[in-house]
Image (cartoon, helix red, strand yellow):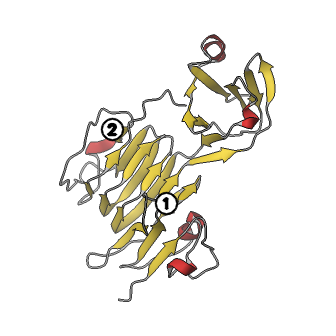
Amino acid sequence: MNATTYYVDATNGNDNNSGTSPATAWQTIRKINSSVFLPGDFILFKRGEIWHSQLFYFTSSGNAGNRITIGAYGEGAKPIISGMTSVNLQWIVYSGNIWKTNEVLEHPQRLLKDGVELLRAENMNELNTNPEIFSWLYDETSKILYIYSTNPPGSSIISINTLIYTVFLDRNEHIIIRDIEIQGGYHLGLLVNGNYIDVINMTVGKYSLHAIQIGYYPSSHIKDRTGFADVSASPKVLHPHFKSIKRQSMCNKNKTIRQGRKVG
């Protein structure tokens, strides 16, 4: 079987390219989502690059002798697949140093201002009373986002997270995913619903409630060579459905990011 290696470069790639060399790399996760891959193929993201706010939904499968590998190439930091996206919004003063906008149509769940995550208020009273601690609020009914800022928020970089999960391996078999950082997915960073999936040397969980969930069915089991760190951490190393996982899947040498937050 002739396997193919595909390269993805967020800065210099182009989805009209063949994708089969670093010089002819693809650019977007959207291109990967719309492609079909064969057993033995490699999909490699360029190190030092970041992909924002694109759900990576992968459904291709390998086989026992020819697994599909999703990984990294080049030098530098792990490539980042992020559920966070920067937004350019028009703000008006609501009251004092509290500003509002009606340009966000989905609950953002997580919010960063100039790269720093802000805690969400439970209600307007909390935002008014403790704005320096709980600095933003989204009203689901009116679709209005409020934020506390001593300067106009338009002068800052505002990033939000609206993806439920960032990477979803759905109904796959014989996949290796390794050497990538996954950020965001306000519920899950990585959702795996398949058999014989190896998750190796990943960094998962920043800006997520839970880091990794593997499968759903109690009859399945996991081949775990190293065990998991602090399952009580926030975000969880695994979703509470840890006992309900697919067969012969393995997590090895992964890092989960503890980001205790009051999330949406």
Residue depicted at x 59% and y 66%: 28
The mark nearer the N terminus, 1 or 2, is: 1
Query: Where's the N terminus, which quadrant?
Result: bottom left
Q: Closest to the observer: 250 or 6?
A: 6
In the image, is residue 145 above or below residue 96? below
Residue 113 percent coordinates (x, y): 62, 35
The disc placed on residue 48 is 1
Q: Are marks 1 and 2 in contact (CB under 8 Å)?
A: no
Within 10 Å of the Cα at label 1, are there few (<14), some (14-19), or many (20+) other Cα atoms? some
Alpha-carbon span between mark 1 and mark 2: 32 Å
Q: Quadrant of residue 137?
A: top right
| SS category of the residue bearing label 1 | loop
Tell me which amino acid carries mark 2. Answer: Pro
Query: Where's the C terminus, which quadrant?
Result: top right
Q: Is residue 54 left or right of residue 87?
A: left
* Residue 264 seen in this snapshot: yes
The disc placed on residue 240 is 2
Residue 194 percent coordinates (x, y): 35, 60
Residue 245 percent coordinates (x, y): 29, 51
